[in-house]
Amino acid sequence: MTREVWPAIERDYLACLHGAGYIGGPPVASFEQAWAAYCGTSHAVGVANGTDALELTLIALGIGPGDEVVVPTNTFIATAAAVVRAGATPRFADVSDDTLLMTPGTLSEALTPRTRAVVIVHLYGQLPEMAGLLAVAAQAGILVIEDAAQAHGAEWHGRRAGGFGDAACFSFYPGKNLGAFGDAGAVVTSRPELADRVRALANHGRASGAAHYEHDYLGTNSRLDALQAIALSGKLARLDAWTQRRIELAARYRHRLSDQAGVQVPGVSPSGRHVYHLFTVRVAARDRVRAGLARRGVETGIHYPVPCHRQPPLRRFADRPLPVAEQAAGELLSLPMFPHLTEAQVDVVCEALGDALAELAADSELADAQ
Ligand SMILES: Cc1ncc(COP(=O)(O)O)c(C=O)c1O
């Protein structure tokens, strides 16, 4: 990816390096404008990473001690950690057995009179059933934040991730669909006062137009670096092509795995555009299958092996069993997925998966016979 994008950014990158305008400035403003336009929002605020994007959004929305925020338990820990770091209480929601995403039903079950907001996570690159979720949130009178860290350019009924909630949070961690040359993130919103507040909080509490040592809020330092903004602008021009490639590779995986016994491929909504940050399947005896794949030279990941409500620092917020996510956590397996993967490599992965499963089946037949 870097090789592909470098010729387009080399001049600006070196000019920034030699000009020493590292913090803020035109490269950041220009990426923010392009990213907001891409997401269909009026504002984007660059921040240091996706975790800060979530925490600063919650704080900017006035969420804090005494407030509850619903988050799906099947997500990266940062979604829930941001709620705790903002001083609020996460309420964990279970997920759909089919898509592994939060549903209107699981959101409803997690609501209490203290719920102030929900963080809807577009996990793996897919938006959940947004109409139902937004209707439940509207009915409950709560704020909606999208965690779109894995969903750059994903759509639901033709609308892009980032344009549904009061605000949406993106990570540009290098491995994301749009990744920087290090940590980076952004908050997008069409509420101008919210954008101003996030920007101020991320810049030591300096309100727009304030002098350098004039601080209206107690903020932090979470700014997007100019060099990262230049890399992101260059990569943004390639994002749709790279996404298209992910979609093609996913279609090949689906086709190849459709008659593979023992592999469950999560459901995809026909109303959406899944951008396949990850291609995650479910298999029984996951750890043994994974070891079989590793022996055949195929590296895999697990997203995520422990649901958030079972993580040690978050267990105190677990108030009930969340059976779908708990069951799935032992079965999830992410197969290789990145735009530069080839069709032939997808075939190798699928054959290795079939072989690993056959080996396991033969082992258990042998054990039964003994
Ligand atoms: C769903 C989700 N939320 C939040 C984050 C946090 O983003 P970052 O790593 O940029 O802090 C990530 C990425 O790691 C993520 O996948």
Image: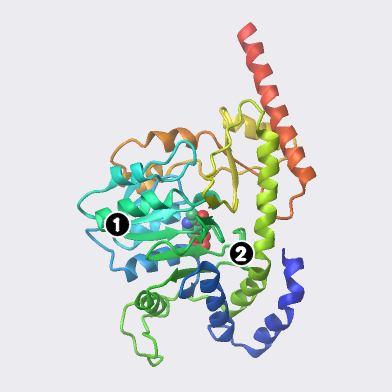
Residue at image point 30% right, 45% down: 108
Q: CA distance from mark 2 to mark 1?
A: 33 Å
Q: Kindly report which numbered mark, 2 or 1, lies closer to the viewer in this rendering.
A: 1
Residue at image point 24% right, 61% down: 65
Element under label 1? Answer: helix
- Note whether residue 278 is visible: yes
- Disc 2 marks which amino acid? Gly
Query: Which residue is situated farthest in the top direction here?
Result: 370
- Note whether residue 338 is visible: no
Query: Which residue is situated farthest in the right direction here?
Result: 344
Query: Which residue is situated farthest in the left direction here?
Result: 113
Q: Is residue 160 above or below residue 251?
A: below
Q: Is residue 351 above or below residue 191?
A: above
Residue 281: quadrant of the picture: top right
Q: Is residue 277 above or below residue 214?
A: above
Residue 142: quadrant of the picture: bottom left
Element under label 2? Answer: loop
